[in-house]
Amino acid sequence: QSVLTQPPSASGTPGQRVTISCSGSRSNIGSNTVNWYQQLPGTAPKLLIYSNNQRPSGVPDRFSGSKSGTSASLAISGLQSEDEADYYCAAWDDSLNGPVFGGGTKLTVL
Amino acid sequence: EVQLVESGGGLVQPGRSLRLSCAASGFTFEDYAMHWVRQAPGKGLEWVSGISWNSDSIGYADSVKGRFTISRDNAKNSLYLQMNSLRAEDTALYYCAKEIGRMVRGAHFDYWGQGTLVTVSS
């Protein structure tokens, strides 16, 4: 049981916009910034969004993040086949005194 | 180019020990906190442990507290994870990850290694 809650799966067709939600509590998302990671099949996770809505260099602007209260979301617009991957949200948890992850969302491009 | 290369994984019996290493290059290792994150087969990511730039601040997940010990050698640009009293549920791919700052105070890992597989089984 992950501390942060994500839907196990999401899907969309090429060109569509898809959003993935991440729900937490006051001790994690409510008090700290949210980061998102993309894990392509068979590879290590890669930082996709940091500090709620910032993109590292090289990440396309099709990817965007937002946060409100104790929830966050990742939006992917202009969906492409290469976006098919697992997506994880993460945040520091003040009660657990460590980082916590969501259970991950498997994105399928139909 | 930042590189993190884990090693030391393998098959080990329950109750035994294993020591993982992570060799870092391409950045000033001593300036950043480092972490271990694991992923059980077919499962999600789980933070294991983190250590600040100067080893003054260390944290562990409850699932490994008292059994695992994280350490670093800044002179050797290396991170370690000593794993004792291993259990079947510790079976996972163990990733070394770099924090963006000096302290263990975030979930912001900007570089990851490719992982080393630990299998605990009799």
Image (cartoon, coloured by chain):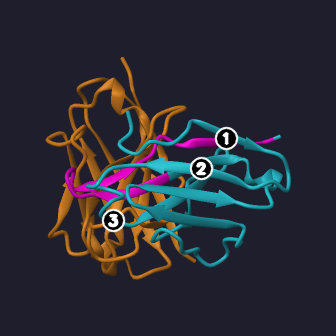
Chain colours: A cyan, B orange
Of labels 1 and 3, earlier in sequence is 1
Of labels 2 and 3, earlier in sequence is 2
- Marked residue chain, label 1: A
**Alpha carbon of mark 2 to alpha carbon of mark 3: how far?**
19 Å
The magenta stretch spans which residues? A89-109
Tell me if residue A97 is in the magenta stretch. Answer: yes
Badge 1 amino acid: Ala
As drawn, B56 above or below B89: below
Look at mark 3 in the image and give the residue it sits on: A32
Badge 3 amino acid: Asn
**Disc 2 element:** strand
Q: Residue at the front extreme?
A: A69
Look at mark 1 in the image and give the residue it sits on: A10
Overall secondary structure of the magenta section: strand
As drawn, A35 above or below B36: below
* Residue B106 appearing in the image: yes
